[in-house]
Every structure is written in C-alpha cells, then in structure tokens.
Amino acid sequence: MKGRSFIHTGEFKREELEKLLAAARAFKSGARRDRPLDGRQIALLFFNSSLRTRTSFEVGIRQLGGGVSTLEIGAGVWNLELAEGTRMEGKAAEHIKDAARYLSRVYQAICVRAFPGLDNYDEDMRDSILRAFEKHSKVPVINMESSLYHPCQGMADMLTIRERFGDKPVRVLHAWTTHPKALPTSVSNSLVLAALQMGHEVTVCHPPEFPLPDPILKQARGLKVVNDFARAAKGAQVVYSKSWGSPAFYGRRDEETKLRCEQYRDWRIDESFMSATADAIYMHCMPLRRNVEVTDGVLDSARCAIYDQAENRLHVQKAILTELVG
Amino acid sequence: MKGRSFIHTGEFKREELEKLLAAARAFKSGARRDRPLDGRQIALLFFNSSLRTRTSFEVGIRQLGGGVSTLEIGAGVWNLELAEGTRMEGKAAEHIKDAARYLSRVYQAICVRAFPGLDNYDEDMRDSILRAFEKHSKVPVINMESSLYHPCQGMADMLTIRERFGDKPVRVLHAWTTHPKALPTSVSNSLVLAALQMGHEVTVCHPPEFPLPDPILKQARGLKVVNDFARAAKGAQVVYSKSWGSPAFYGRRDEETKLRCEQYRDWRIDESFMSATADAIYMHCMPLRRNVEVTDGVLDSARCAIYDQAENRLHVQKAILTELVG
Amino acid sequence: MKGRSFIHTGEFKREELEKLLAAARAFKSGARRDRPLDGRQIALLFFNSSLRTRTSFEVGIRQLGGGVSTLEIGAGVWNLELAEGTRMEGKAAEHIKDAARYLSRVYQAICVRAFPGLDNYDEDMRDSILRAFEKHSKVPVINMESSLYHPCQGMADMLTIRERFGDKPVRVLHAWTTHPKALPTSVSNSLVLAALQMGHEVTVCHPPEFPLPDPILKQARGLKVVNDFARAAKGAQVVYSKSWGSPAFYGRRDEETKLRCEQYRDWRIDESFMSATADAIYMHCMPLRRNVEVTDGVLDSARCAIYDQAENRLHVQKAILTELVG
C-alpha cells in the first residue's frame, strides 16, 4: 500500500483492510513499538473543528517517530480556492493546487479534514477538497473526514467489533437518531460500506425522509434498510447510532430541523431499546449529545463501547500511516 | 505523588511541596537532565488565553522527553457541556465527561486552564471544570489556572522567594492594585495559601471592597489583612502585587470598575512605595499593565524578580510532571 | 554569526550570505543531516497568517533536532503593547518588552512575523515590532516577514536563482502586477536588496504611482527602475512578479484600489510576456492569485520555479538557524 492515499475504505481490498487491522492490534497490544515515521513530517489540515481526530493523529504520529504540524484553514492560514481556471479575485488568497504542491515538498503525507457544506448536494457528492488534494499532492493524502467518507473512523469501528466479537460476522444495526443540527453522513457512509466489505450483516434504520446519499446506496450491496425504529433493535449484536442530515433537504434545512426535533424527537437509544437487542454493544463515533441521541443509562453501562472506539482511532491511524507513509 | 492530580497546593503536604521545589532547582541548575516523560503524551487544554503557561508547559514537556498537544476549546475544538444528566440540546457538542474519558485513553496527563466566569459566584467557587476533569479522567489532571487556584504559579513564586532569601521565612506583602478589568483571584489564592503553608508571614492589603473569597480566607490560617495602602509597605521583604475582582461585585461589575478606576486609581506600586519596604523584591505573575499596576521604575530595577518568577514556571512544572506523571 | 539576529539581509556581509547559501544547499542535497538544534527550543510568533513560513519553520526546526512552539498573537495569546513609557489602560494586556524578556528565558530563539499596518507610513518604516523584539530579547530574533523585510524569502530566492543559473550574475526583472488588495513591500524589498548584494542586475518595473519605499530605494544602489510593462520583459533571465501597495497611498487605499483594479488591471504575467524574455524562469513568493497576477499557462509551465522557491525556504531557514542559533 506504500505511497497510496487513504480517502475511502472501498478503494482498498478486504485483505488490505485486514492487514491494517492486524497492524492496529499489534500497536495496541504493544507487540509493535517501531518508529516507521522517523524523519518523516506530516501535516494535518483542518477545514473544520476536531477533538479526537486531531489528538489521535498528533499522538500517533509522534509515537511512530514522526513530526506533526497542525494547521487550521481560515484561522492562521488563509482560505483556499478550489475552482480550476478561475480568475482569483474573491476571498481565497491561494489555490488548493498550489498549497498541495507546496505541502508535498515539505511533508511526507497530508491529512485533510473537510466537512460537506450541506448546501450544495452535487458539490458534496464530489468530495471536492479531498479529491483536489489527492490530485495535486505528490505524497499520500489521508482523509480525516470529508463530505463523503470518514475511513479512519470506519476502520476504528471495524477494529472495535473485532475486539468484541472475534473474526465472525455480526448483525450491525446502524440507527438514525434525532439531533438539534443537520450532520454529515460521512461516518455512516464509511461504517456501512466497511462493515459490508468485512462481511457483516448491516441494517440501517432511519425515518423515510433520511436515507443515506444515493452514491453510497449504489455501493452498499446487501444493505438492508428499515424505517421502523420500534422494531429495529431485534436481533442486533451491535447498535451504532448516529444522526445525519437528509440528502433530500438541501436548501430546506429549517423544514428538516422541524422534522428531526418534533416528529422524530423520540428516535433516541435508551435502555429499553437496548434490551430488545441480542445483548448488543452500543457504538457511536462521538461527539454525542447525551440524553438527546442516547441516554446516560446506555452510555454509562458496560455495553457501551464508545471509548474503545475512540481509542482505536489512534491504533488504526498508526497502522494506516505505517503502511502508506512509513 | 505518582498518579495524583495537581489542582491545589493545599492538597499536598509541605514535605511534598519541598520535594517538588528541590526537583525544580535540580532541573534549573542542570543537575537533572533526565527524560522521565519519554514515550508519554500530554494534552494542554485551554479554555482561555495564555502566553507563559502554554509556552512553559510546551517547552518543559519536550525537555522531559514527552509529546505535547495544545488544544483551544471553542477555537478548533467545540464547547463542552458541564451539567450532569442534562438533555444536551444547547451549544455544547460534547460532554466534559466524554472528553475527559477519551483524552485519558490517549494522553498520560491532562493539563487544563479554565478561568472563572466572574458572573456566578457559587459556580466559580466550585471550580467546576477542573473538578469535572479530575473526576472523569483516569490520568493525572494538572491545573494550569482555574477559577480558584493557580498552583503552578504558586510553586514558581515559592521557588523565587527561596532563591532570593534561602530557607528562612520572610515577610510577604500581597498588595492589591488597580486595573481596567476585573480579574480572577486564583493567583492570589494560591500565593497566599502556599506562602502560609511554607511558613512565611503573609499580609494581604486591599481596599475594603476587595477581600479574597470566603473559601480561601477560611483556609488561610494566620493571614493578616490590612486596608491601608500607604502604610502597608513597611517591613515587607517581598512585595507581590496583583489586581483582582471583588467577590462582592458579582453582577455589578460596572460599579466595581468605577471603584477600581476612580476611587482606587492610586493603588499602584511605585518607587516611593518600594522605598518604604525592608529592601523588598518586587513580584508579579504577569501579564501586567505597566504604569497602571506598577511603574516602569520598579519593573526595570534590580529589585524586580518577575522574569525569574516566569522562568521558574518552567522548572516547577517539570518537577510536578516528573513526580506525578513521570 | 552565532548569537546574531536575522532581521535584514543587508545587515550581513556577502560572504556571510554565501556561507548560509552553502549550508542550505548541503541540507537540501542531504550532505548535511546533523541536528544542531538538539535540546534547543524555538518560538514562532505570528501577528499575521501564514502557510509556508509556519510549516517550513516547524519542519526545519524539528529536522534540526529542536522543539518548536507556534503562537498566534490575538488568538490564544493576548495583544502586546509597543509604546515605551505608556500607561497601559488600552487593549494590550502585556508589553512587548516583558513578552520578549520572558520568551528569552525559555526559548533559544524567537521568530516573529509582523506585517505592516499599511495605514501609518512612518510606523511601518520603523519596523517597530521586529526592532522591539530585537532590542528586548536576549536570544536571536529571526524575521519571518516584517513591515520592511522578508529576509528568509530573500535568501530562498537567491538559492533558487543559484540552482538555475549557477554562480554567475543574472538579469532579474521584478515586475509589479495587479491584485485586489494592497500588499506589503517586504518581499520586494528583500528580493531587490539581496539580489543587488549578490551581484545580480536588477530592474524593477511598476506603474509610476507604485514605487518601492524611499528607505529601500536609498539602500538599493544600482537598481534600475522602469515603468513600461510592455517592454520590461526584454532580456530578463528571471521574471519575479509581485503586487504591492503604494507608499504614496497611505490613508487613500480606496483610490489606490481603483488604480490597481481598473487602470492597471492588465499588469499580469502571461505567456506572451514570458516569450519576450531571454527564456526567463518565473518566480513568485506565494500565495498568489492565479489568472489575476499571473496566468495558469505560466504557472503550470516548466519555466515556473515557484515550488522550488517555496521548498528552498525550508533549506535556507535551516541554514540560518544552524549558523545563528545552533
């Protein structure tokens, strides 16, 4: 995998993903303590806020012997132009092409976080910022969450399921919940696609107005979709909840908020939901809003795997950086 | 002291504080050059701005062989919810409990700066943010200045007095001065309590409207309080000046500002004040407003110990991290 | 050069600049891989945004074995007072004198970026922030771009010309172009003065209203000034374009913007301009606005040296830090 970018798990074969998971487990157990990034410098570029991603990348890179620079676009670093061939008379002081080419001269990998704008569906579906970096960078680009994908989260999720259930496939329920804000689908997209690729049985449950985006559904062979929250829990071994904004409500977020906050206010994971499952573990990528998306009772129970998930970000990212950049 | 948090000097025995001071002197003199944080990762969490604290922690951690991540809450990292059991529908995207639990998985210590809001007395007196981190973190929490305490500053102050006067107790005058803004009492609280614990004779001088908070006064056995600025200097071997907001003016800061800026505008340390002392040194934690709190003449004289104090932050923090986290 | 500050190339002899260029080439080729900053800590202080400067300093310092802290004044660090003797009742919480003195206790060098305000000509010409740091710091101060100079860029430019043309002097055209905003002259000042000092033949071409500042012209012996854009290309071996604000339009930037955006809108480097040169390379310090300052055709051609220039920042800065601080 040396020299490749990591934008989407679906661009890697299952055996490659397995190799990454094995390396992650070796880092986590302490079996591996090597420093494959010795003498390497990695840039973290944030177009959006972060807690876990930023810290787990910073720590992981240093533990692998590398140096890390954390940059926030629009705060200490100016805005970047995305359009090709344009006359740059607007706000952006530099073209993404030039930033990517420069950064490739000084860093041995570029990690980028760029959330969807959630107001232009086609643009979001093109994953333009990540793909522009991939196109113009001479060094590997690692996706730290884009419009479409959050592959490092997806890998941490796969590792967490493995740790709890071993190598056998499990029944994963990905349950939409309510939330005061419209959120990206990137975590859901990567979870669903990675879980299917790893052989799990995946059901997504959401209100009819909140499907995952079409380009994802087209890739998601074998995905089961249900809309009945009350019955969704049955048989699940993993309940992974998350809120996301509807692809159908671009430009009409106020209407959507009303739906989410009024009509679907009860779409929340609680102890009674969990007790209908097949003794499922509870997963979430964090950050999460306690008692809105999921109750304190579920979160503070032994079934809750969210802190393992978060910690596993560190280990899978070390594996990815080692294999692609080391 | 291994594994303990460092929230307040008063939670440590005098012999423990002495051990920290001895380690700090060894780091400062170059007698100690070991790297007890090798392989350790430390997070610095700032809810408020910083110059000395941030830089001295960053430098100290690297000198001890550790890795350091600096995070600013509300700038690049979202806001955190503090209330237990609440339905999180407000601004905060994550509960402090979940942030603390996650950070404990990736870092070996969490250093936190969280100033008082200065508009809710009871909340400020609970030191809620630091105590929440202490409660939910599995790793030591170091206080980088909270609503109530600035224990690293207090230790740097004790080291500075030792350097100038040796082991014998001295007469410390802590003098309130004017300032355009209402400031926290944390530095004053830690100074007064640490100095008393180390056996010094401590007098605090302030206008009648500007006492230190009650919970501090209750701990401060032997503290002498005076209100006569003109006569306070007499006999002092250390003049440590600082401005702070009155605990009595919560919700009425405009009135307080008037008092500070009009009635007490002359509460300022100048050469004539210093010449009434017993040849005292001048101390201040910085940042300071020249010619408002203290004159250029005092600051640029040989009696001024503020740069030693600031440098000593580095050495005492290295001692604290070594003993608690190393 | 040990212990000296690096504010302006003109404060160094040509043989010193040559020594720095030689060290830069050794770092770039890999001939030098030593770590002269081992155990050293360097502060980067940004009063303004940055991409290349910040990243190349961070990477270079780590590659030399040093530790680096990046600080943004006004974001996470409070504002600094510049005036001597003033009663500090305004916005600034700390005097630059005290910040510089403190930072000298903890860091072994202080690198500062402080752009001109562009609204007070005399203040800009004094380069007050850099000079205040130089005055009050006990350790070397490195200029990361000030009101007047960008000496690290100037050195990177000299290295780039050397790489393309060898040791012989070349004909450098520094061409003003249009831009939506008034920009500092620091890059131009350092380019012109360093190129003259290195023995190159330098012509600057700009509209009559856009001369370089007087204090620079006084130092720039042998500089040829022309105002005819159409004929300027002839004979040039290097075309280095840049926009800058006019020293004559302080306080009248709106009028200037009109001139720049209307009357001088065609002052832009394109393929036809380049074809009139003596097969010149194209240079620019970046960031740049594509198709406003220079066309995609020039930038994406083999003649374009801007990515080399940017990369060379890293190597010359490593040389400077090694010689002055190592």
Image: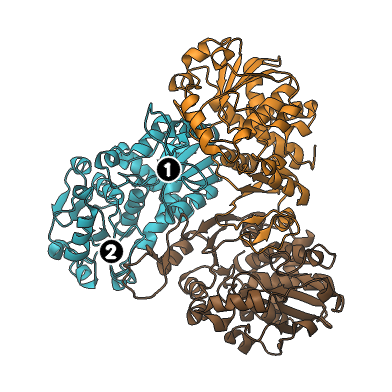
Chain colours: A cyan, B brown, C orange
Q: Mark 2 points at which residue?
A: A281
Nearer to us in this view, C46 or B248: B248
Q: Left or right of C191: which side holds B47?
A: left
What's under tag 1, amino acid-wise? Answer: Val
Quadrant where the image shows the C terminus of chain C: top right
Quadrant where the image shows the N terminus of chain C: top right
Residue A108: x %, y % from top left: 51, 36
Whether residue C314 is visible here, answered yes or no, is no
User: Helix or strand or loop: what does disc 2 sit on?
Assistant: strand
Nearer to us in this view, C300 or A206: C300
Q: Mark 1 points at which residue?
A: A112
Q: Which chain carries label 2?
A: A
Proximity of marks 2 and 1: CB atoms separated by less than 8 Å: no
Q: Left or right of B117: which side holds A147?
A: left
Q: Which chain carries label 1?
A: A
What's under tag 2, amino acid-wise? Answer: Ile
Residue ID at (60%, 72%): B183
Residue B300: x %, y % from top left: 81, 62
- Mark 1 surroundings: few (<14), some (14-19) or many (≥20) residues within 10 A: many
Distance between the alpha carbons at the discs numbered 2 and 1: 31 Å
Nearer to us in this view, C272 or C73: C272
Residue C266: x %, y % from top left: 47, 21
User: Helix or strand or loop: what does disc 1 sit on?
Assistant: strand
Residue ID at (64%, 79%): B189
